[in-house]
Amino acid sequence: YVSSQRSVLIGVLEASIKPVRFAQIVKDYSVDSGLIFDLFDELLKNGQIKGSLLGGRQVSSAVFIPTIFTKAQEQFVKSFFKQNGFIG
């Protein structure tokens, strides 16, 4: 059971290119809300997913922010400032 839950969570989080709410993962993919944080911590520690958790450790408020999203946002901001002559 835990292994299948881990597989589902890996799939969802690895495929994420934008922030995803844990409440939505629990609802859409039937991930056990009692396991989700332990599995998340394990996957993050093992390097199987890359990103961060915002909003605390309650399913209703937790949001996974993938590293790829953060990097894209940083690149957009840098590009904007460079194109508009704010930085050289």
Image (cartoon, rainbow, N blue to C red):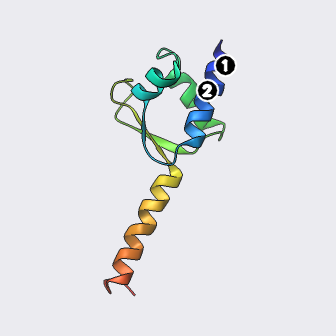
Say which residue appears at 57% left-offset and 45% top-offset: 50
Identified at 38% across, 31% down, the residue is 62
Q: In the image, is residue 35 above or below residue 63?
A: above
Q: Is residue 49 left or right of residue 36?
A: right
**What is the x, y in percent for residue 5?**
61, 20
Furthest-front residue in view?
28
> Which mark is drawn over residue 55?
none
Q: SS class of the residue under badge 2?
A: helix
User: In the picture, which quadrant includes the C terminus?
Assistant: bottom left
- Of the pair 61 and 25, the residue shown nearer to us: 25
Residue 8 lies, in percent from the top left, at 61, 26
Per the image, label 1 sits on a secondary structure element best described as: helix
Quarter of the image with the N terminus is: top right
Left or right: 34 in relation to 15: left
Q: Residue 63 location, x and y as percent? A: 40, 36
Q: Nearer the viewer, residue 56 or 78?
A: 78
Looking at the rendered structure, the kind of residue marked 1 is Ser
Q: Badge 1 is on which residue?
A: 4
At horizontal 46% and vertical 22% (from top left) the residue drawn is: 26
Q: Residue at x 48, y 14 (%)?
A: 34
Position above or below: 76 against 45: below
> Gap between marks 1 and 2, in whole Å?
6 Å
Estimate how packed mark 1 is, as few (under 14), some (14 to 19) or many (20 or more) residues with alpha carbons within 10 Å: few
Type of amino acid at the residue the image marks with label 2: Val
Residue wearing tag 2:
8
**How many numbered markers are drawn?**
2
Q: Please provide percent x and percent y for residue 76.
A: 41, 68
Residue 83's place in the image compared with 30, above or below, is below
Q: Quadrant of residue 22?
A: top left
* Mark 1 in CB contact with mark 2 (< 8 angstroms): yes
